[in-house]
Image (cartoon, rainbow, N blue to C red):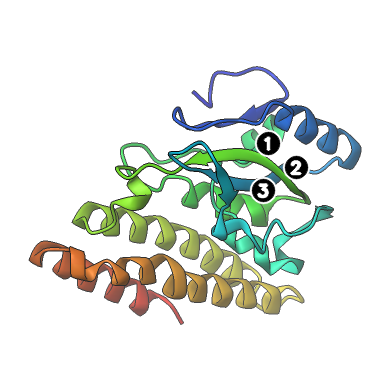
Amino acid sequence: GQAHPDGEFLAFVDSDDVIPEDAYALMLDTLERSGSDFVTGNVHRLKTDGTTEQSPMFRRAMSTTRLTTHVLRDWDLLGDRIACNKVFRKDFWDKHALAFPEGVLFEDIPVIVPAHFLAGSVDVLSDTVYLWRDRHGSISNKRALPRAVHDRTAAVTTASTFLGRRLAEAAGTPFEADWAEAKRRYDQSVLAGDLWMFMEALPDGDDAYHQAFLDHANAFADHAD
């Protein structure tokens, strides 16, 4: 679908989630004032009883509103890795040929992590712009599956490889230290977050899941510095 719109902006929504009524107006107004490449906002979980609560994943990154920032000077944005709480300028999206991988789980990560680094600037809103439905049968809640750990590891490896290429290109320049720090911090976040959640699911998995976890977690650990 991303190849077809001819408008100025792009936004993505999962079919079972909810957009607060004023979210897009707020995000578009912010981009008009700032000129940033995209805007990202706070996410709350929408529980089965209809109440909402702050998503822990976004608590730090969205704690305050700040315009024209960037992940290289705002490391909390490494935790902002979903597409649905954002509005992108389409010319930015097209310039970098961003595209989601098809037929896999966790397809946001290989696009959103590089987008944060490719952007000239990003706007961050503490306002809630997305209500992420908390369903027992969702992908996020079904971790102890070989496919899940395979696809998550593939996604984070793609993002880490992007940072590795940037680091190699920056070798010998004043930006080398920034990209080295970016890759170190991202790989650390994968080990402490993405892969840790699959380690926590080991008691719920069968032998096939245990083997998949060992294979893929070790592969990423070998890849990381």
Taking the spot 43% from the left edge, 39% from the top edge, the residue there is: 48
User: Which mark is first along the chain, 3 or 1?
Assistant: 3
Q: Quadrant of residue 172?
A: bottom right
Task: Determine the secondary structure under disc 3.
Answer: strand
The amino acid type found where label 2 is placed reads Asp
In the image, residue 174 above or below residue 119: below
Q: What residue type is labelled 3?
A: Asn
**Residue 186 seen by the camera:** yes
**Could you tell me residue 99's position as x and y percent?**
50, 38
* Type of amino acid under label 1: Phe
Determine which residue is flagged by label 2: 37
Estimate the x, y position of residue 215 in percent, counting from the top left. 21, 70
- Mark 1 residue element: strand
Q: Tell me, yes or no, whether the two marked residues, 1 and 2, touch with CB atoms within 8 Å.
A: yes
Find residue 212 and report its horizontal and vertical position in percent: 19, 65
Q: What's the mark number on residue 88?
A: 1
Depth check: give the residue in front, 159 or 80.
80
